[in-house]
């Protein structure tokens, strides 16, 4: 299902954090939201998963304004893998994933065999079937993150939103998680810090700076030396990854403003 | 170029720090003036009003030995013998408590930490009340302030020892063992005062109610609490899934379709109903609300669909048992049930702390 943000503005306190951002995610597309710290990525994402009501503009999924839906209805369509949103207290992995069924369940509704099979299916997709009865708190960071993805899948959402899902993961688990996202064939909006991962795994990118949209398009069109220099204040050499042939960035500190030394000299 | 950029950055960071250091000097001066004014005002006010200016001159005479004596010996006695110690004691204690609070907040990495949270004040109270009600011999013949200090010191050591696990003390454990010690010590204080008050003292019934008791139960007491319990627990069971979702934090719960702000209010009102009707008929009984949910989770996991009904049953069985113990332990005297639950609750809490060796605790 298609996600449209039109001229969205969002405030934290009295400060405008996101200003006039228009963004589209086509059905089945993975769109990456990138930008420096404090550029408003997470804040913009919050307006999509109803954590923060936008002060301007509209957020629509398909034909519905997400902010006009009842909370449960919205949660059946949009699932989130947020930072620091794992349960406290002791739960088994299976119980955590089962929580994904919450928006589909009324008062006193029991878990049906169908719910159980959805939970098993979600665990299978993140390759954690063997962990179903493990205590969630005993898992590693990478495993926990996969459980959170499984919980989101158990919601059977039309749109999956992820806020820095690769944070705190080692490189193996970062790649594993993003490969998993690719394999889901879902409509996905994700914020990423690592620009090479964004280039490798997103269909399109939106680049934010100081709450405003600076560029959008295919990774090779957004991740240009000129734009990155302007927004991130770093210099970059663009190459093709020798194995994956993907757009690859090598960063180095900003050089003299007047003449950019050719990389060979360094 | 890079280096110069860095030094410019540092300069930019230095500026607010330096200006805060400058205002600090002003702050110290301003607050010192306030403190002196407060002390002088304190000494000047009372049955006999003395002008602040005279108070200041009397104080200056005593402290610095300056100025001619233009006041009566009575004024001197009022200011120096009776009122000055009181104002200065208040100043000393205020400074000591505030400083210790700042230290404890840093130690516990917790904005709510203060000497009461850590049970330190509770330890001082028990020693003081023991010395007052049982006589000085109980506290080794120490004068009251020393007895209280010893109580506080021993409690501090005990709380620290309890918070220790595997040679490490974590901030959360410190707070938790402090809260537990505070509960137990306040039960001991109640017990001591209750003993001293005797059976016919109206203060005794106030204390019995404060410590929690089922002594005055009648059939007519049962109606409202049973309706409230059935309604609230039924309602909560219907919302058990949403309560599970709430354990994921605000973002997690919202993403699972829970209207978190409204739901929190709903839960608060329901618990207010349950607690309100309970306290109205029994007084405030500690530790049940803390212990029983942990026991229930230990037995059946954290899913509220199982935790809530099991809590209701366990809590009921536990409190009936505690009431029986309170009646038989020092018969014919009855121990308020709240003191019995605290006696169980303290060790339980210690066990809970020791058992849970996870990083989070």
Image (cartoon, rainbow, N blue to C red):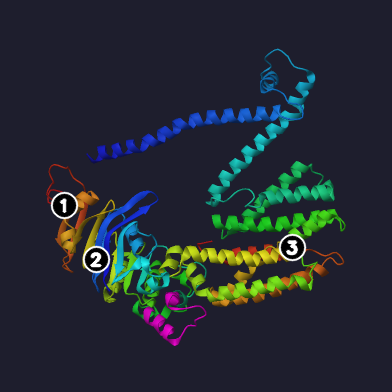
> For numbered disc 2, what is the local secondary structure?
strand
Do marks 3 and 2 both belong to one polypeptide chain? no
Do marks 1 and 3 both belong to one polypeptide chain? no
What residue range appears in magenta? Answer: A98-122
Identify the residue under disc 1: A226
Identify the residue under disc 3: B212
Please state the horizontal and vertical placement of residue A76, each as a whole percent of the image. Answer: 38, 74
**Residues at marks 3 and 2, CA–CA distance in whole angstroms:** 61 Å
Label 1 marks a residue whose chain is A
Residues B211 and B165: in front is: B211
Q: Quadrant of residue B160?
A: bottom right
**Residues at marks 1 and 3, CA–CA distance in whole angstroms:** 72 Å
**Residues at marks 2 and 1, CA–CA distance in whole angstroms:** 24 Å
Tell me: A244 left or right of B146.
left
Tell me the number on the disc at residue A257: none
Q: Is residue A105 magenta?
A: yes
Q: Quadrant of residue A196?
A: bottom left
Count of numbered tags: 3
Q: Is residue B306 magenta?
A: no
| Predominant SS along the magenta part | helix
Do marks 2 and 1 both belong to one polypeptide chain? yes
Tell me: B100 left or right of A245.
right
Q: Given contact means CB atoms under 8 Å apart, are the residues at marks 2 and 1 in contact?
A: no
> For numbered disc 3, what is the local secondary structure?
loop
- Above or below, comparing residue A259 to residue A89 in the picture: above
Identify the residue under disc 2: A24
Please state the horizontal and vertical placement of residue A164, each as a whole percent of the image. Answer: 33, 62
Can residue B298 be seen here? The reply is no
Tell me: B295 left or right of A237.
right
């Amino acid at each position: 299902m298609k996600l449209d943000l039109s001229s969205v503005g969002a405030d934290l306190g009295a400060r405008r954090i996101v200003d006039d951002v228009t963004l589209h995610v086509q059905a089945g597309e993975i769109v990456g939201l990138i930008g420096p710290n404090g550029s408003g990525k997470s804040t913009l994402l919050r307006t999509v998963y109803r954590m923060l009501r936008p002060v301007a503009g509209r957020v629509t999924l398909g034909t519905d304004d997400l902010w006009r839906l009842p909370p449960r209805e919205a949660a059946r369509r949009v699932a989130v893998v947020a930072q620091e949103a794992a349960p406290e207290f002791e739960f088994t992995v299976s119980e955590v994933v089962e929580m994904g069924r919450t928006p589909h369940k009324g008062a006193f509704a029991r878990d049906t065999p169908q719910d159980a099979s959805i939970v098993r299916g979600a665990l299978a997709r993140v390759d954690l079937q063997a962990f179903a009865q493990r205590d969630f708190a005993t898992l590693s960071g990478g495993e926990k993150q996969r459980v959170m993805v499984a919980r989101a899948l158990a919601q059977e959402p039309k749109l999956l939103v992820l806020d820095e899902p690769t944070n705190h993961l080692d490189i193996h688990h970062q790649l594993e998680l993003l490969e998993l996202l690719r394999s889901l064939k879902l409509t996905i909006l994700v914020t990423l810090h690592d620009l090479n991962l964004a280039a490798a795994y997103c269909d399109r990118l939106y680049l934010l700076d100081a709450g405003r949209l600076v560029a959008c398009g295919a990774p090779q069109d957004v991740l240009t030396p000129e734009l990155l220099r302007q927004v991130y204040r770093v210099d970059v050499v663009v190459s093709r990854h020798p194995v994956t042939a993907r757009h690859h960035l090598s960063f180095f500190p900003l050089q003299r403003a007047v003449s950019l030394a050719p990389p060979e000299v360094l | 170029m890079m280096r110069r950029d860095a030094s410019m950055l540092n300069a930019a960071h230095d500026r607010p720090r330096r200006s805060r250091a400058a205002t600090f000097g002003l702050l110290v001066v301003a607050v010192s003036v306030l403190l002196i004014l407060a002390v002088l005002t304190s000494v000047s006010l009372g049955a006999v009003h003395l002008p602040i200016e005279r108070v200041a001159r009397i104080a200056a005479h005593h402290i610095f030995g300056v100025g001619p004596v233009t006041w009566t010996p009575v004024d001197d006695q009022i200011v120096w013998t009776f009122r000055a110690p009181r104002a200065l004691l208040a100043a000393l204690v205020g400074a000591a408590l505030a400083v210790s609070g700042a230290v404890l907040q840093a130690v516990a990495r917790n904005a709510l930490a203060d000497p009461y949270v850590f049970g330190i004040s509770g330890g001082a109270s028990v020693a003081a009340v023991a010395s007052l009600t049982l006589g000085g011999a109980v506290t080794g013949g120490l004068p009251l302030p020393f007895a209280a200090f010893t109580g506080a010191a021993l409690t501090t050591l005990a709380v620290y020892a309890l918070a220790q696990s595997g040679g490490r003390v974590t901030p959360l454990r410190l707070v938790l063992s402090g809260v537990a010690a505070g509960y137990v010590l306040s039960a001991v204080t109640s017990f001591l005062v209750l003993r001293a008050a005797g059976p016919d003292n109206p203060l005794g019934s106030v204390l019995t109610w404060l410590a929690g008791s089922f002594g005055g139960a009648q059939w007519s007491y049962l109606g409202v609490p049973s309706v409230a319990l059935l309604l609230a627990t039924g309602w909560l069971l219907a919302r058990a899934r949403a309560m599970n979702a709430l354990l994921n934090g605000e973002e997690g719960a919202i993403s699972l379709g829970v209207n978190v702000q409204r739901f929190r209010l709903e839960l608060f009102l329901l618990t207010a109903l349950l607690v309100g009707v309970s306290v109205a008929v029994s007084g405030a009984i500690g530790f049940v609300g803390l212990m029983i949910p942990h026991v229930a989770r230990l037995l059946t996991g954290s899913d509220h669909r199982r935790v809530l009904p099991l809590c209701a049953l366990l809590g009921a069985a536990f409190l009936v048992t505690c009431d029986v113990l309170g009646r038989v332990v020092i018969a014919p005297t009855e121990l308020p049930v709240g003191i019995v639950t605290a006696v169980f609750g303290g060790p339980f809490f210690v066990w809970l702390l020791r058992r849970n060796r996870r990083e989070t605790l």
